[in-house]
Image: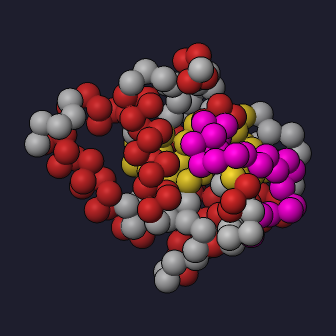
Amino acid sequence: MKADRWAAVFCGSMPGGNPKLIAAAQELGQRMAEARIGLVYGGGRVGLMGAVADAVLDAGGSVIGVIPDFLMRREVAHRGCTELIVTSDMHTRKQRMAELADAFITMPGGFGTFDETFEIITWRQLGLHNKPILIADIDGWATPLVQLLETTIEAGFARPETQALYHVVTSPAGIIAHLGNLSIAQPMASELA
């Protein structure tokens, strides 16, 4: 099934200890495929990354994996992707994912997920893109992250209007509903050239 638009999903290369999070990743993948939203992600076949990708593929959707060469073995590259892009480094990986995506979704994950999330919010704050950013607070996972963002604003290290750079949702259904209400965003400003 050809995708009408693409969403980058940032999530863990490990499964975590909460089965609800894996179930949510699988549900998100299935719902994305049904809504004709293609997946752009880190290219691994393990953890929540693999769960989302497998669910999209199982439901007949399209998946683009973007993985740096040095992580091909560590994250066990997903060979079933519709397309697998191998980059030279992490920065190029994130830039390529940003170019391909019409929106960004943060699902549960670790330090890499936080890195990707903060960078894409920062890029939007700097005007390098105007694409939607959704933070999925599945089973309370992102509550501390959202509190950190709000505390940063309250402490005067970010302007109050930066809170509009991202939206918090609590379920895969909420993610798809939110994306369904959005028009396809503008491309990256000069693609960070």
The x, y position of residue 75, in whole percent, is: 68, 68
- Which of the colour schemes (rainbow, by chain, secondary structure, one colour) is used? secondary structure
Read off the magenta span.
Answer: 76-97
Q: Is residue 89 magenta?
A: yes
In this view, the residue in front, 142 or 157, is 157
Quadrant for the N terminus, please: top right
The x, y position of residue 192, in whole percent, is: 56, 24
As drawn, 185 above or below 14: above
The residue positioned 56% from the left and 53% from the top of the image is 10
The residue positioned 50% from the left and 52% from the top of the image is 106
As drawn, 81 above or below 139: above
Asked whether, in this view, residue 134 is left or right of residue 190, the answer is: left
In this view, the residue in front, 179 or 101, is 101
In this view, the residue in front, 48 or 171, is 48
The x, y position of residue 105, in whole percent, is: 54, 48
Residue 123, quarter of picture: top left
Residue 138, quarter of picture: bottom left
The residue positioned 51% from the left and 25% from the top of the image is 129
Asked whether, in this view, residue 41 is left or right of residue 144, the answer is: right
Q: Is residue 178 visible?
A: yes
Asked whether, in this view, residue 62 is left or right of residue 17, the answer is: right
Q: Is residue 35 visible?
A: no
Q: Tell me how many marks there are.
A: 0
Quadrant for the C terminus, please: top right
Q: Is residue 23 magenta?
A: no
Question: Which residue is most to the top?
Answer: 190
Residue 59, quarter of picture: bottom right
The x, y position of residue 60, in whole percent, is: 86, 55
In this view, the residue in front, 97 or 68, is 68
